[in-house]
Amino acid sequence: MTVTIGTRTLGDAHPTYVIAEIGLNHNGSVEIAKELIDVAAAAGADAVKFQKRTPEISTPEHMRDVPRETPWGTMTYLEYRYRVEFGRDEYLEIGAHAAERGVDWFASPWDEPSVAFLEDLDVVAHKVASASLTDDGLLAALRETGKPIILSTGMSTMEQIDRAVDLLGTENLVLLHATSTYPMPAEEANLRMIPTLKDRFAGVPVGYSGHERGLAISFAAVALGAAAVERHITLDRGMWGSDHAASIEPTELAALVAGIRDIEPALGDGIKRVFPGELAPMAKLRRVGAGAAV
Ligand SMILES: C=C(OP(=O)(O)O)C(=O)O
């Protein structure tokens, strides 16, 4: 089974769909968001992703009044959430910029009104953040859209994943294996979940959403069959904000995409054959023995 997002097709035998997760790393600035889109396009990523919230709905009650030091002064956590949220006009500008650069754009809506907000902007797909995997109302609203849905599976049990997949249906679904530790230590990567999810949800493309430092684990995810790779990106890991430290910088994103494109043709089809390039070394090095004719 394949899933088509924009002009790209995801699934076995198709290129890995690389998602540059901007998330909140734009720090509320459309200019930074556009710079990050430029970075993603220059690196050869397929899509940029944002996070869309209705802060008074998606901010947990106990967090709302917690004071937060920000570059814009001390404010409550709820005020900060509003400060970094883009409205319709800003997303129209962002969407136009992504289209100009040839990359898909979409977002993870964190509440039901945000689904309607993104639908109005005619996004090509929706993402479900790991934190939202058990939000039945959100999943039902997303299924209603009929758009491709990319479901992240961090901080979840297999039973919760089964239920979310039941609610979303497998028709237009991409699963992402994820561990929601920021930054994620290698011991928590559990990359063999990629083949486990592929076996359990036959035909559903399975990818990887990474929060580790460096690129090696994401490359290994591709070697294990990931149909998509999502990584947080930032202009500079030293920037203010909670996700920058677990993000990759522009040169790393370029290296990630280039490395993935090198790995893809190397994976082959698993059928043993003698390649033309091996014939000369074989003629030179192999002693002819009883097994040669087999
Ligand atoms: C947090 C998100 O995703 P993940 O769970 O894949 O990190 C998101 O998409 O907003």
Image (cartoon, rainbow, N blue to C red):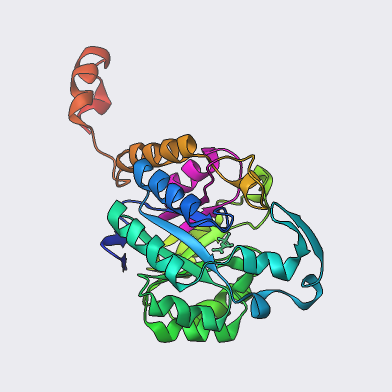
The answer to whether residue 60 is left or right of residue 118 is right
Residue 23 image-quadrant placement:
bottom right
Q: Residue at x 56, y 38 (%)?
A: 214
Q: Magenta segment: does it hold 62? A: no
Quarter of the picture holding the N terminus: bottom left
Taking depth in this image into account, of 193 and 233 the one nearest to the observer is 233
Q: Is residue 224 visible?
A: no
Give the magenta-colored segment's residue range. 207-235
Q: Position of residue 274 (x, y in %)?
A: 23, 33
Quarter of the picture holding the C terminus: top left
Q: Position of residue 16 (x, y in %)?
A: 36, 51
Taking depth in this image into account, of 1 and 119 the one nearest to the observer is 119
Q: Residue at x 23, y 24 (%)?
A: 278
The answer to whether residue 239 is left or right of residue 164 is right
Q: Residue at x 61, y 52 (%)?
A: 190
Q: Is residue 255 visible?
A: yes
Residue 90 image-quadrant placement:
bottom left
Q: Quadrant of ligand 1?
A: bottom right
User: In the displayed structure, would residue 30 be above or below residue 113?
Assistant: above
Taking depth in this image into account, of 60 and 229 the one nearest to the observer is 60
Total labels drawn: 0
Q: Magenta segment: does it hold 223? A: yes
User: In the displayed structure, would residue 288 be above or below residue 107?
Assistant: above
Q: Position of residue 33 (x, y in %)?
A: 47, 54
User: In the displayed structure, would residue 26 be above or below residue 185?
Assistant: below
Taking depth in this image into account, of 189 and 129 the one nearest to the observer is 129
Q: Position of residue 55 (x, y in %)?
A: 64, 74
Residue 84 image-quadrant placement:
bottom right
The answer to whether residue 37 is left or right of residue 188 is left
